[in-house]
Amino acid sequence: MRVFVTGASGWIGSAVLPELIAAGHDVVGLARSDASAAAVTALGASVLRGSLDDLDSLRTGAADADAVVHLAFKHDFTDYAGAGRTERAAITAIGDTLAGSDRPFLFASGVALLTPGRVATELDPNPTSGPDAPRGGAEQLAFSYTDRGVRTVSLRFAPTVHGPGDHGFIAVLVRIARERGVSAHVGDGTNRWPAVHRFDAAALVRLALDHAPAGAIVHAVAEEGVPTKDIALAIGLGLGLPITPDAPAEHFSWLGPIFAADIPASSTLTQKDLGWIPTHPTLIEDLAAGHYFRVTD
């Protein structure tokens, strides 16, 4: 298949591209800059110049493809509502283009905050909807295209997609610990964070593209819930810093409410239905490897 991928040069997308190409797919990656275009080309994919704000580029990419994998998102926590509106517009542009074609439309979502305090499963609907909801209520919006002849599949990623080069939540926690001179967790640290290695997540995207039916929800979750006290301990060991329990959420700035949440999630159904078996290092093993603590210029 000819597969159009947004976020192609991003953290997850740059792992997905080689997976798709190795499986025999012809991949076209969206790139908004010369650097992104060069990265996409280096991975063996073709380039379509554009961005999430350029809806015509999204329509063109979708129209020319046999399938769309939408991984791009504006991770701007200073204007999260604006990021949600952008996501909603992108979903609409792609969905309208694919309507009536029975072509696959895989889109990135998440397991965080689906069912705080209990294990979320693939059977749990996303409780958010509408333009003012997180991510613009994109999951429910995208699934509205299932009845319009689109093979929509939700890719719900763990909040921590880790691995060498990660610049996401774990890297932020490491930076905060280094700046404050302590590694901390909120409360007693028994609240849980799901996690998945980047390469395991990429393998799941490939499996979902080839096998997931219309309306499917897949959970890119290798570990149901890593206690945040274990994360804090691993960061403290890596940086040689003391551990501070019962820190206020404000200690972690904008990340505090997320790091304080208990948001476990299961991928039992995903593994059974798609034959997905995570094989790469766990989050704590990845932290113990040391790459999160190397200082680069």
Image (cartoon, rainbow, N blue to C red):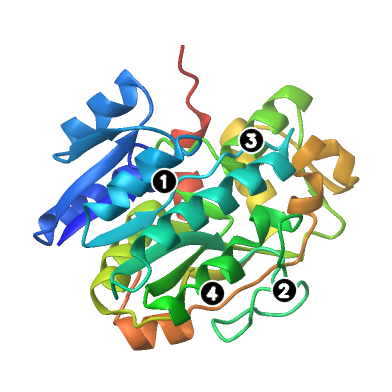
Q: CA distance from mark 1 to mark 4?
A: 34 Å
Q: Nearer the viewer, mark 2 or mark 3?
A: 2
Instruction: Pinpoint residue 61: horizontal percent, then vertical percent.
Output: 29, 47
- Secondary structure beneath dot 1 equals loop
Marks 3/1 in contact by CB < 8 Å: the verdict is no
The label nearer to you, 1 versus 4, is 4
Residue 163: which numbered mark, if any? Answer: 1
Q: Mark 4 = which residue? A: 144
User: Residue 157, position in %: x, y?
Assistant: 51, 61
Give the class, few, some or many, for how many residues have Cα within 10 Å of label 1's Cα (few <14, many ≥20): many
Q: Earlier in the sequence, mark 1 or mark 2?
A: 2
Q: Which residue is mark 3?
A: 172
The residues tagged by marks 2 and 3 sit, at their Cα atoms, a distance apart of 27 Å
**Within the image, what quadrant is residue 40 found in?**
top left
Q: Mark 1: which amino acid?
A: Gly
Q: CA distance from mark 3 to mark 1?
A: 14 Å
Question: Pointers 2 and 3 in contact (CB under 8 A)?
Answer: no
In the image: residue 225, left or right of residue 101 = right
The residue at which mark 2 appears reads as: 127
Question: Is residue 31 depicted above or below 151 in this figure?
Answer: above
> Which numbered disc flags the more N-terminal residue, 1 or 4?
4
Q: Residue at x 85, y 37 (%)?
A: 251
| Frontmost residue, 263 versus 66 | 66
Alpha carbon distance from label 2 to label 4: 15 Å
Q: Is residue 16 visible?
A: no
Q: Position of residue 90 (x, y in %)?
A: 50, 49
Name the amino acid, label 4: Ser
